[in-house]
Amino acid sequence: MQEVIKEMNLIKKEVMEIEAVAQLRRQASSIPVGPLTNSSIVKDNMMVGFDEVFLEVLDKLTGYQLSREIIPITGMGGIGKTTLARSLFQNALVKDHFDIRAWTTISQTYNVRETLRQVLFHASGDSSGDLSEEELGEKLYKFLYRRRYLVIMDDIWSVNVWEKIKFFFPDNGNGSRIIVTTRLSNLSFKLNESYRVDMNFLDEANSWDLFCKTVFGKEGCPLEFEEIGKNIVANCKGLPLSVVMIGRLLAKSQRTREYWMLIEQNLNSIVINTNDKFCLKTLRMSYIYLPNYLKPCFLYMGIFKEDSSIRVSMLEKLWASEGFLKPRSGKSLETIAQENLKELVDRNLVLVDKLGSIGNVKYCKIHDLLRDLCLKEVGKEMFYHFFNRDSLISSHARRVVVVDNGYFLRDRLPSSPSCARSIIFEYYRTNECWRRKAPLPHNCRLLRTFKAYNNDGVASDNYLLDNVFKLVNLRYLAVKATQNSEIPSSVHLLWNLHTLIIHCPDDFIVPIENLKLHRLQHLVFCNRKVILPVLDPRIGDDDDSAIMENLQTIRGVKNLFLDEEVVKRIPNMKKLCLTYIRRCETNGGR
């Protein structure tokens, strides 16, 4: 009865919280914030945090270089590209410097004729609605000839539009400039190989300054709201659009601590859904315009916890095991994965978190609002299914993400879902006493990916490996093995396996049958104390079947007998991390 009462109280509390959030959303939607477009933000002249960038580009616009120059401004959607361009466009010095100024918005579905018509109209006041594309271009060229002009092309998504209209913008040798705003970093390189402006996130101080100016104007923030306000700003993660949007909402709403606390607790949901979902639409454009081969790679980022730093090598292996990567042009899946990640970074959808020693991206992350966008798109497309204490898992679910690793979930999981292609445990318990031996799913013969361990020290279940041979379609397996556990000799039946990651007990022995896993590419043991006689030429056969041509990574192996014969068995090895331990003769130590 006590347990039932406790559960009922928790349900009552949750219902009250849901009702409070619903009331908050109703209040937010009823506040006349006004159309929150980029131009409306500029009207307040809030170029907070971008003063140096503004002066740098201003110097480029009014500098001594006489040839026509393209100035690309790149960055994530909502980071302030258009705001910066508008501020420059309306600057008094810029107005005096250029004879002609014109603005056009390209967007995703561009129209060359309409683009030329907009530029001509803003430059000369001539609409010329009945002229053809060629006639408009010729008329624009003649009007711009021998004049110093500034043209801003906002929100360009393809270099093709510039290739089609560039002939109509003469290089008069008088310092004419063209500013292009884009979310695609690689596109900006095509427009100008030597110079571009990268818009970065606001730091904590500038985010707070922008927030205060948006909410309180010239007044300072009252002391009673400062702590809550700074928490709200911190959760915006430096994105100006998010800071301004939530600031405008608070500026028009009741100033009570209770209301601000509700905003703090439900920030992303409020930002995404306030003001006709303007923020969601702004960010969603980046997703819609992704090529089809990149969409699943981007949506997959939503399975990772908020603010988590994602190891790129793990992410790329998961993409491969999920079947997102298709061989093309004779490239390996590893190369294709690296190219896909680079393209997502270039599109400002994935952020670089940490570089490796050779300049490669070692860790990446995703902004909270983009993660929320992922989750919304996942819900529409049923891309993967989140499994927690409140959800029922469908037997037809293809991808399952376990987000609440309670004992009742673990016990329900082995027998379902029978159609699952992947099961990902992304949220782990930190209470050691909850850990116990767990069986691998035994009714998922179609399973390709089973990830139940992260090499980050967080507690996770210990898995029995005795029935691993039943998962014959596995490509990726990452688990923590139980004490005194061992890989069964039947492991050779996992003929599709390309990644095997095991956190295992000391002196864990890998059987000779691993030699038969000819597709195995990555063999990782997380405790660095594994005995691997599998490659010892003194054990087993020396025929061609012992050569593991696809093996690229071995980590966590101790005292491997490494000689020329062993090297011949692993001809394509790229990463080799071995540990050698010797006994001290004096005291028996290591």
Image: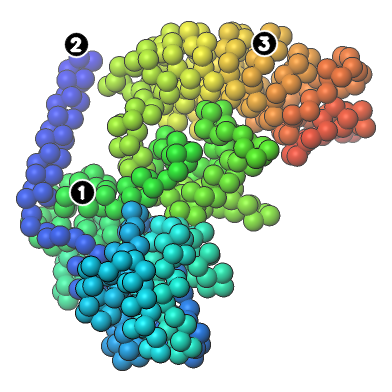
Crowd band around label 2 with a 10 angstrom C-alpha radius: few (<14), some (14–19), many (20+): few
User: Mark 1–mark 3 contact, CB under 8 Å?
Assistant: no
Amino acid type at circle 3 is Leu
Other residues around mark 1 within 10 Å, as few (<14) / some (14–19) / many (≥20): few
Q: Which residue is mark 1?
A: 277
Above or below for 378 versus 160: above
Would residue 370 appear left or right of 493 to someone viewing this image?
A: left
Q: Front-most of 150 and 539?
A: 150
Residue in view at x 51 percent, y 42 percent: 310
Q: Earlier in the sequence, mark 1 or mark 3?
A: 1
Q: CA distance from mark 2 to mark 1?
A: 45 Å
Quadrant housing the N terminus: top left
Q: Are marks 2 and 1 in contact (CB under 8 Å)?
A: no
Q: Is residue 586 above or below residue 183?
A: above
Q: Position of residue 35 (x, y in %)?
A: 15, 60
Q: Nearer the viewer, mark 2 or mark 3?
A: 3
Give the residue type at disc 2: Met
Q: What is the distance, in whole Å, between disc 2 and disc 3 at their CAs?
A: 49 Å
- Which of these two is toward me, 191 or 234? 191
Q: CA distance from mark 1 to mark 3?
A: 51 Å
Residue in view at x 60 percent, y 23 percent: 475
Q: Is residue 250 visible?
A: no
The image quarter in which residue 301 lies: top left
Crowding at dot 3, Cα within 10 Å, few <14 / some 14-19 / many 20+, comes out as: some
Residue at the location (45% across, 59% down)?
Answer: 160
Measured as percent of width and height from the top left, residue 460 is found at: 50, 25
The residue beneath circle 3 is 493
Residue beneath label 2, please? 1
Going 58% across and 46% down the picture, which residue do you hit? 339
In the figure, 113 relative to 370: above or below? below
x then y, percent, for residue 494: 65, 15
